[in-house]
Image: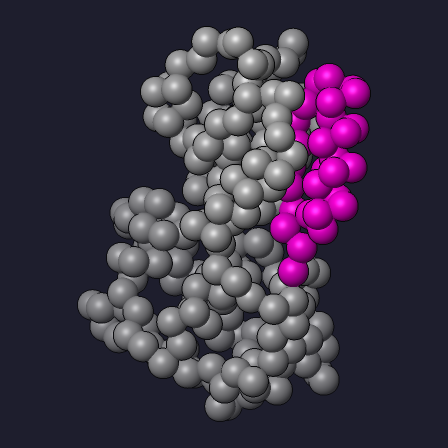
Amino acid sequence: MKTKILLAEDDPDFGLILKQYLELEDFEVSWFQNPEDIVRLLPTDFPFHMGILDIMMPSIDGFSLAKMILKEKKNFPLLFLTAKNQKIDRLMGLKIGADDYIAKPCDPEELVLRIKNIIKRTRPSYSPQIKIGEYSLDTEKLLLSHHSGNIRLTIREQELLLYLLHHNGTMIKRDDILDTLWETNDYFTGRSLDVFISRLRKYFINDPAIKIQSLRGIGFEVDFPVT
């Protein structure tokens, strides 16, 4: 599955060069010169795996944009672009949730290496197509297919499904799921998790071999016949 990168860079020349180089490296890049366009996307499913944000942008600076993104999309990996001689508050960036910094104009090979390291740390490796019993999951299209029909998953539904698949055949603690995917653990997120689990059970109802069993007071145990 291609890594989908959100690029916020107001410099038209540097942004175009960066987009073209990353696409040659087989990344899928959505380039925005106006960060306000990104803010308008936040209420949607936001189909990106990480973001590259220029710190100095005229309408919304990179730090402010990062705060807006992370408020809606917790755990979203971010790499900041800084000017060569720019003094930045790295501590502020780390508090916001920066995964890395790189000075521009940057060495393209170094940038690609930093991106790959971020992805390796934050995202498990899955093939684009996963066979789950009688179902097929297209992770690029967020599409769960069965001969009875297709279901378009939300990003959070797919994240939860992939997390369960990653821990297939083991006991999974509720707290671990909430801490990893929701980054918080309270009554309301716990109820939200229950809703998502119920949805997944409903989606897989046509294959009795697929089991998502609740363990009272502990979490879940799943059995996915994956091939």
Q: Residue at x 78, y 20 (%)?
A: 12
On the image, the x and y values in percent for residue 1 come to 65, 60
Q: Is residue 28 visible?
A: no
Task: Let me know if residue 27 is in the magenta part.
Answer: yes
Q: Residue at x 59, y 56 (%)?
A: 154
On the image, the x and y values in percent for residue 105 come to 64, 21
Q: Residue at x 68, y 75 (%)?
A: 145
On the image, the x and y values in percent for residue 171 come to 28, 74
On the image, the x and y values in percent for residue 98 come to 44, 31
Left/right placement of residue 87 relative to residue 58 reads left
Q: 201 or 13: nearer the eye?
A: 13
Could you tell me how many numbered marks the image carries? 0
Q: 140 or 12: nearer the eye?
A: 12
**In the depicted structure, whether residue 72 falls above or below residue 116:** above
Left/right placement of residue 62 relative to residue 165 reads right
Q: Residue at x 27, y 57 (%)?
A: 175
Q: 95 or 67: nearer the eye?
A: 95
**In the depicted structure, whether residue 27 falls above or below residue 210:** above
The range drawn in magenta is 1-30
Colour convention of the picture: one colour
Q: Residue furthest bottom?
A: 209
Task: Let me know if residue 50 is in the magenta part.
Answer: no
